[in-house]
Image (cartoon, rainbow, N blue to C red):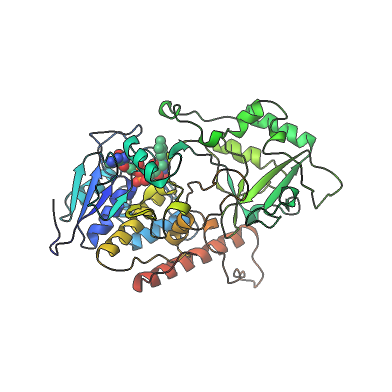
Amino acid sequence: MRTSPNGLKPIHVVGGGLAGSEAAWQIASRGVPVVLHEMRPIRMTAAHKTEGLAELVCSNSFRSDAAETNAVGLLHEEMRRLGSLVMRAADDNQVPAGGALAVDRVEFSATISAALEKHPLVTVSRAEIAGLPPADWDNVIIATGPLTSPALADAIRGISGEDSLAFFDAIAPIVHRESIDMSVAWFQSRYDKTGPGGSGNDYINCPLDRAQYDLFVDALVSAEKTNFHDWEASTPYFNGCLPIEIMAERGRETLRHGPLKPFGLTNEHNPTEKAYAVVQLRQDNRLGTLFNMVGFQTKLKHGEQVRIFRAIPGLEKAEFARLGGLHRNTFLNSPKLLDDTLRLKSMPRLRFAGQITGCEGYVESAAIGLLAGRFAAAERLGDEPALPPVTTAHGALINHITGGHVPSIDQGPSSFQPMNVNFGLFPPLTAPAPKGPDGKRLRGTEKTMAKKRMITGRALNDLDQWLAHPVHEAAE
Ligand SMILES: Cc1cc2nc3c(=O)[nH]c(=O)nc-3n(C[C@H](O)[C@H](O)[C@H](O)COP(=O)(O)OP(=O)(O)OC[C@H]3O[C@@H](n4cnc5c(N)ncnc54)[C@H](O)[C@@H]3O)c2cc1C
């Protein structure tokens, strides 16, 4: 095993995927030796096909590269400024894809494997870590992803005290609050209950009359669904959650007596008429910019979701931060279990990174790997790990994982779910939106684009300042 000229003990990174490869690179770039443990090809996962580091298991797209107007494009740009290996390999192996950044997956993985394998401070060890990392590994990053091997998943479950780690995500769609028509919808908790931490006005309610409800049920039953992979079919449903379209198939009234029940709610726009059914949306982040559709976990194709959910009164112009889905995943209840630098509170020598922490997507996983690598290296060098400002895409994402989520205010399961980076995770702007060249207020798409530019401009400015003077800033 290689040691650094300054005799530093190595950091161990478990999992050579998107997050683990980026973490290892960041650590080595800071002069700290690192051992990257990857179980492939000795043990494969159900989705990986090669032994290459940072293999892309499905699409070859890193999504939009528009740093000014798209949250994942902004994340790309921030990662470039932070010296990301994953972004360098993506840029070097780009294939034409319009405004998206898509890559040649074979060359991308080969570039990353070569960079790590020839780095003098990196040792790549091909072996499964089939239990808790040995006690003398004092600084470990676990980045084993959604398909973490069962032996390690069991060990993590044992120390985290959680019932389950691998399950179907109950992913309900998430809607940007400002796209909901509040002249139709209204704020109210069922029976005005306040609950722990609630106000009695915690849900946004969208009313359906009898005809609208019937059309909605028919649309759900006849809509196009996605299929499970064979290897997903053996995984249990998380907390017995059922897709909304399966509930609709069980009987015309099932949803009305389940997630769409109208009881204990009065439409403030039409108090004398009882809605036949009510769709409820629950606040999803502390900022109050995102709301999730309660009970709307679904296997419907994305296009079908948009079409059917925009037929709900109040959601005609809904913008979705995330659409619903059900797929096998492995992730921690991070807001409860991890500290603000991604360490397991009950065993701080273990830090987590990538999709297992509750982010979603190749780029987000690599970005969290990048931060975990910086934090771990800082710790090894005796420095205080510096958190990125919450106004940056990195800060917004880690804040979602470790702190920004609102715990469930009713009796339901914890609603923390993996999430792609999106503008709903950023703190609102404090300055007013700019005016048009004629001095008039901007409207519609122009206003939305101007606000996005302000958010991304603020992010890159704050990132540059942070890079120049990294200080430990607690996540809000
Ligand atoms: C079927 C499927 C399709 C997906 N499609 C997309 C998509 O199209 N676009 C997108 O952006 N995201 C997609 N994702 C999500 C994607 O997996 C993640 O975004 C990303 O790969 C996660 O990065 P990661 O580094 O956390 O995990 P991974 O990239 O999966 O890396 C984890 C690594 O850890 C290794 N490992 C696991 N257990 C052990 C162990 N015990 N010891 C040693 N090594 C171990 C694995 O072999 C793997 O190399 C998909 C996920 C799945 C499961």
Work out whether residue 252 or residue 114 is closer to the camera in this orientation and state it.
252
Q: Is residue 86 visible?
A: yes
- Identified at 68% across, 36% down, the residue is 258
Regarding ligand 1, which quadrant of the image does it lie in?
Answer: top left
Name the residue: 72% across, 47% down: 190
Residue 110 in percent (x, y) is at: 24, 44
Does residue 106 appear in this view? Answer: no
The picture places residue 260, in percent across and down from the top left corner, at: 70, 39
Residue 432, compared with residue 196, is above or below; it is below
Q: Is residue 131 left or right of residue 322?
A: left
Left or right, 45 with reference to 67: left
Which residue shows up at 33% across the image and 47% down it?
Answer: 143
| 386 vs 89, nearest the viewer | 386
Quadrant assignment, res 339: bottom left
Depicted 325 relative to depicted 1: above or below: above
Q: On the picture, is 149 further left or further right than 322?
A: left
- How many numbered discs, if any? 0
